[in-house]
Image: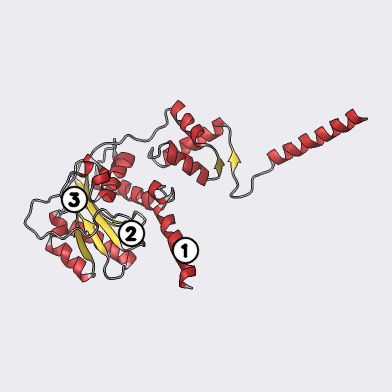
Amino acid sequence: MGETKRRAKYTLFEHGRRRRLDKPSKPGSFQRLNDEALLTHIRAIHAEVKAEYGWSKMWKELVARGHRVGKERVRRLMKNHGIRARCKRKFVVTADSKHHLPIAPDLVQRNFTPAAPNQVWTGDITYIATDEGWLYLAAVVDLFSRQVVGWSMQAHKQSSLVTDALKMAWFRRHPDPGLIFHSERGSQYCGHEFQRTLAGDKMKSSMSRKGNCWADLGFCHNAPTESLWGRLKVGRLYGQKFATHRESMDEVIDWLTFYSHRRLHSTLGYVSAMQFEERWHAAQQPKAA
């Protein structure tokens, strides 16, 4: 009689266990995957981010999507199947600082962590090779969230390139007077057109000291934008060939959208720039009330 009861209890236990395993997970709950299924997700994300994530960001992305998985397991699977992030490379800096225009003081002093959005922006220029010739890209980054708030692409690197990027940022954000705009000492940023635009929008000009940023990004005086260019070129442009300016522009715009809206930033606690800023604004509401 005792044996019969034990078997009945075991049968009920197994039946309940199968029901729990077969039961669909609630929204937002973690799901345990076997290696084959997990590898499918890893490969899909790897393709989605164009091979930009290493195993650490891949693990964070999987967890954010509701998958129950450990760091070491992700690292092992990626290593065993040859899934890796694109390698880092060095790129030439395009600063044209050989001029006699006035140089603004360095108001940032390598303090790249302002306390709120729209306090410190930084800008820089890079270039992209196409069969139609160089395409130049200027970007404006809000240092609080590392979000790209303005950009401009043209077939030249005259003052209008950086001025248009600044105007786009201003119209999108409408910052309060006193915002600091930090840049290198290129003639485009020192020129009268750009400085007049800054003054008209009541912004303060700040410029980094001379130096080789690629020698050591940790000691670069405009590291955030130099890092941005590295991620763009390594993560998306390296190895691609563009027949026209339009082709390269489409690729850059797609990546800039990904960078600000979806790319996980380790310096922001592995959330996107947009999420980081949205959380900050949400946290300010109780204070305002």
Q: Which residue is mark 2?
A: 114
**Along the line of sight, which residue is nearer the eye, 95 or 161?**
95
Q: How is the image coloured?
A: secondary structure
How far apart, in angstroms, are the residues tagged by discs 3 and 2?
33 Å
User: Real-space Cα distance between discs 3 and 1?
Assistant: 42 Å
Binning the other alpha carbons within 10 Å of mark 3 as few (below 14), some (14 to 19) or many (20 upward) gives some
In the picture shown, does residue 18 fall above or below 96?
above
Residue drawn where x is 90% and y is 30% of the image: 2
Residue shown at 21% from the left, 40% from the top: 215
User: Which disc, if any, is residue 283?
Assistant: 1
The x, y position of residue 19, in whole percent, is 73, 40
Dot 2 amino acid type:
Pro
Image spot of residue 97 (x, y percent): 12, 51
Query: Dot 2, how many residues are within 10 Å of its Cα: few (below 14), some (14-19), or many (20+)?
Result: some
- The answer to whether residue 137 is above or below residue 90 is below
Of residue 251 and residue 16, the one placed in the foreground of this image is: 16
Q: Amino acid at mark 1?
A: Ala
Residue at image location 30% in from the left, 44% down from the top: 232
Q: Position of residue 195 (x, y in %)?
A: 16, 64
